[in-house]
């Protein structure tokens, strides 16, 4: 890994510890939700997971996106269709990691 880069494991482990992600039950999974395909040098942040945020992150050259409202919630359908499909497809096509912490 080059100077100034983090692996997704390093970043997600650090955030999990810092934010005490395992400390309580939440409405959905906290932490890494979608794995990208490259080391992390630039992180984009936003409140909610949406296609526009992911496109802006891609256009800005971000390797990861950190949000409060992730893609997955308890009780939601497990199928990747509609808006959920569009969000996941945008991330996968760009190779961007998604981390979410609804704490």
Image (tube, grey):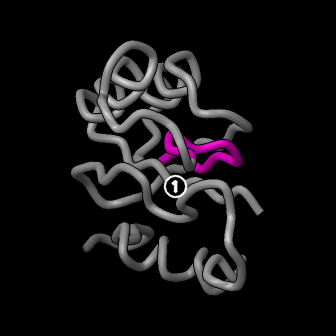
- Magenta residues, start to end: 64-73
> What is the chief secondary structure element of the magenta stretch?
strand
Q: Looking at the image, which residue is at 67% across and 34% down?
A: 48
From the viewer's perspective, is residue 24 above or below residue 59?
below
From the viewer's perspective, is residue 69 above or below residue 87?
below
Task: Answer whether residue 42 is magenta in the image.
Answer: no
* For residue 19, side relative to residue 36 (left or right): right
Q: Position of residue 2 (x, y in %)?
A: 29, 70
Q: Looking at the image, which residue is at 70% across and 85% down?
A: 23
Q: Quadrant of the N terminus?
A: bottom left
Q: Looking at the image, which residue is at 37% across and 67% down?
A: 8
Q: Quadrant of the C terminus?
A: bottom right
Q: Quadrant of residue 3?
A: bottom left
Task: Answer whether residue 72 is magenta in the image.
Answer: yes
The kind of secondary structure element at disc 1 is strand
Q: Which residue is mark 1?
A: 99
- Nearest the viewer among 15 and 74 is 74
């Amino acid at each position: 890994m080059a100077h100034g880069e983090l692996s997704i494991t390093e970043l997600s482990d650090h955030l999990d510890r810092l934010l005490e992600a395992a400390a309580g039950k939440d409405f959905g999974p906290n932490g890494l939700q979608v794995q990208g395909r490259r080391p992390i040098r630039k992180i984009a942040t936003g409140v909610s997971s949406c296609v526009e945020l992911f496109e802006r992150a891609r256009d800005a050259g971000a390797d990861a996106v950190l949000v409060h409202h992730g893609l997955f919630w308890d009780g939601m359908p497990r199928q990747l269709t509609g808006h959920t499909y569009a969000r996941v497809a945008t991330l996968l096509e760009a190779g961007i990691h998604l981390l979410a912490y609804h704490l």
